[in-house]
Image (cartoon, rainbow, N blue to C red):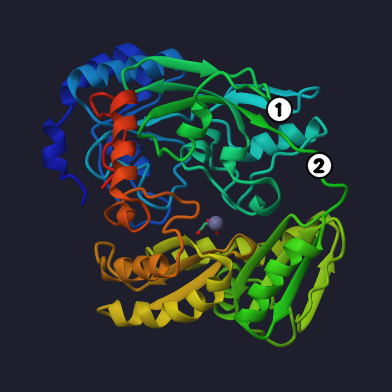
Amino acid sequence: MAASDAALACQHREVLPELVDVVGPHHVLTAPDEVAPYCTDFSGRYRGATVAVVQPGTVDEVAGVVRLCRREGVAVVPQGGNTGLVGGGVPVDGEVVVSLRRLDGAEGVRPEAGHWTGGAGVALGAVHEAAAAAGWAYGVDFASRDAATVGGTIATNAGGLRVLRYGDTRAQVIGVEAVLGDGSVVSHLGGLVKDNTGYHLPSLLCGSEGTLGIVTAATLRLVPPPERRITSLLAFDSVDRAVQAAYDLRRDVRTLEAAELFLASGLDLVCRVCGLPSPFATPHAAYLVVEAAEDVRAVGAADAVSVAGAAERAGLWRYREGHTRAVNTLGAPHKFDVTLPPPALAEFMHAVAPVVEAAAPVPVRTWMWGHAADGNVHVNVTGLAPEEERVDEAVLRLVAALGGSISAEHGIGRAKRAWLGLNRSDAEVAAFRAIKRALDPDGILNPNVLLP
Ligand code: MLT
Ligand code: ZN
């Protein structure tokens, strides 16, 4: 629930002059219209309010803000491009927002080493551009690339469209700089591929959702760019055939980079909202957007189209990447980003809509798309009030019953913390808490996410 404006008026006001001392008067935003864009997450489901958005411009300023907030007992929410989808980066409980977007300087690509170093506030799309200009590529990519920041992708361990080939963000981060909860700075940005000198802080900070440290800079592993990219849209007459094809392609297509799934209902909505023509003369039950250096043919496909030009490829990707925006036009969706073990993905996709309907107190619609070859499907339910949680519980319990994970890539945030126990034992959660206490002794870093 959002902290009320009246409560916020007195909450934390005393730190404002000192925050100004740390970051300067232009970088402490307090006017309601200035802070509003930082207070609602990208899904629209999680809304909050804050007394201030602080915009540090250096790692020392981030450390100064953390030390001050620790001394005054003020909770902070770190925020990058605010493209999160689980309420993990917005001040739902009246926290002070620490926006990292001004940390957008970059040392850039070291071509001989094959890595990129830069600030947490650099947009993911800018990393792609810098890598391409130096003859390299970056392995993590997704639709909100121009708004999402490096720091946000690390805090959430972002996945996206090419995990099947390059792995998630955790697999790319070979150096990190961060401010811990006591205001100390840890920095290890050298980027050596082999470096067994103790605990691997990049792994720990990846996916920690801003609860252990505020990432301020990173060194990211780059990959050789593919020789060429051919994008295919494959149509299937059943979900089962499309899911099976996605798994088979992983084994059969050596250069496969992506195998992304969507369904007839989602395609129809995307075409209407984005003004796109239908890709085939007749509709089909399910589709895969597939990308590889070769022209991919899949067993069981009822229709297919392949393109190689950049504009044509972007045209096919629009059918897949338009889903988030198209569903958002129906009102704030309840979003679930779940992974199922391979044999259970199609079974889950058949089972979930009836489970949603049985739990929903009002008429709803269920939408699905995702990263089929990773076993990761995005389930979006529209028509529910933001605070309604019966459907959330039913979907997440179904996932756990089928051996899946309740978060494949968006994180736990506020959306799923009540159900962390479906996937994590008491002993694991106790270990998480011990790590949190060690790195954030007074619990000021994003204290209202992840841990139940
Ligand atoms: C996607 O794969 O489309 C993203 O994770 C965003 C979303 O789930 O809406
Ligand atoms: Zn996704």
Q: Quadrant of residue 23?
A: top left
Q: Is mark 1 within 8 Å of ligand 2?
A: no
Separation (CA) of disc 2 from disc 1: 13 Å
Residue 125 is labelled as: none
- Indicate the secondary structure of the residue bearing disc 2: loop
- Identify the residue at image location x=69%, y=46%: 166
- Identify the residue at image location x=67%, y=21%: 192
The answer to whether residue 58 shows anywhere in this view is no
Q: Is residue 31 left or right of residue 213?
A: left
Residue situated in front as seen by the camera: 227 or 212: 212
Q: Which residue is mark 2?
A: 225
Q: Position of residue 235 (x, y in %)?
A: 72, 78
Q: Is residue 98 left or right of residue 137?
A: left
Q: Position of residue 89 (x, y in %)?
A: 37, 42
Q: Which residue is mark 1?
A: 115
Relative to 308, residue 438 above or below: above
Q: Quadrant of residue 280?
A: bottom right
- Identify the residue at image location x=30%, y=57%: 419
